[in-house]
Amino acid sequence: MKAPRVTLDQWRTLQAVVDHGGFAQAAAALHRSQSSVSYTVARMQEQLGVPLLEIVGRRAVLTDAGAALLRRSRHLVQQAQQLEELARNMDQGWEAEVQLVVDAAYPTEHLSCALEAFIPQSKGCRVQLREEVLSGVEEQLHSGSADLAISSIGIAGYLPQQLGTLQFLAVAHPQHPLHQLRRTLSHQDLEGHLQVVIRDSGRRQPRDEVWLGAEQRWTVTSLSTAAKLVSRGLGFAWLPRHDIAAQLEQGTLAVLPLAQGSERAAPIYLYARKDRPLGPAARILADLIISHSQSD
């Protein structure tokens, strides 16, 4: 790949000529001589082989090619400035990236609000977001692949910050045979029907937290898939209330009238890696996650 012929300083000079209305004004704004500014733009045109400016009366006016190139150059200069700012921030201990691992059952609304609030404070720090289920979050934290982790299980050896409580409901389509019994349901009633279960994404010691042990079991990898299957009458499942609010309102899902256990509450926790202190960006993101988890 050939090295660029035109430097960022040259693009900045052309921008100054256009933005300030001429060579003399650009020279004053850049604290340079007018001859230096004129030479820089003339040299650019030679290097590019394209006329960028033309003199109309006493004004330097962009050509069509110059206007197109100038628009693109503004993005280039802006990206270079952002890169330099990121380098300065990193020199001051600011992270280039934060690894965030989240249990898939955590409300997307809370998470998106926290991330939106993080953007203007991020100073260019990227967020690597990964969704896991149950022990998958724990494994990512133990392996060092997570700076911050949101989990619905207690993780030994880490200090948790409780974010709230998730509510899971036992649901099925209103026309499902379990609802047609039209009575309070027992554990034995459920065992005779298909249960849809979310697969634990952990590999070492995966959990079957809500499986009842019935032979009729379908295991899926996402909560949304489980909700779609159950909404079509294919089995029953325990699903987060916040994820199925629309289906409950529309009548494609209904809570099963269990004698006990139709509602299950699970605390949700925020954890931080402990092999090294969190950087400033991760601490800001953690505070925002805590704040927005209490927004309801």
Image (spheres, grey):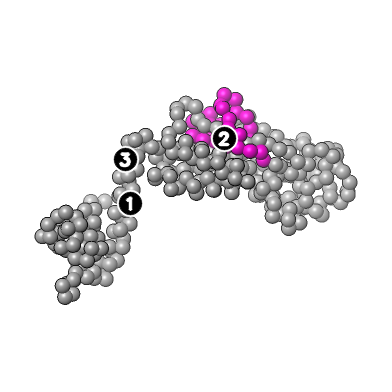
Q: Residue furthest top?
A: 157
Residue type beneath disc 1 = Gln
Residue type beneath disc 3 = Arg
Mark 3 and 1 residues: CB-CB less than 8 Å, in contact? Answer: no
**In terms of secondary structure, where does tag 1 sit?**
helix
Q: Residues within 10 Å of mark 2 (few under 14, many from 20)?
A: many
Q: Is residue 138 left or right of residue 125?
A: right
Q: CA distance from mark 3 to mark 1?
A: 14 Å
Q: Is residue 287 left or right of residue 244?
A: left
Rendered residue at 46%/43% (across/down): 127
What label does residue 188 carry, if any? none
Residue 153 in magenta stretch:
yes
Whole-percent x and y of residue 286? 51, 37
Q: Nearer the viewer, residue 4 or 64?
A: 64
Q: Which residue is mark 2?
A: 270
Going from the N terminus, do you reach mark 3 or mark 2 first?
3
Q: CA distance from mark 1 to mark 2?
A: 34 Å
**In terms of secondary structure, where does tag 2 sit?**
strand
Q: Which residues are magenta?
A: 137-166
Q: Residue furthest bottom?
A: 57
Q: CA distance from mark 3 to mark 2?
A: 30 Å
Circle 1 or circle 2, nearest the eye: 2
Q: Which residue is mark 1?
A: 79
Residue type beneath disc 2 = Leu
Q: Which residue is mark 3?
A: 88
Q: Residue furthest left?
A: 35
Whole-percent x and y of residue 100? 51, 39
Where is residue 188, by image quadrant? Answer: top right
Q: Is residue 37 left or right of residue 125?
A: left
Q: Residues within 10 Å of mark 3 (few under 14, many from 20)?
A: few
Mark 1 and 2 residues: CB-CB less than 8 Å, in contact? Answer: no
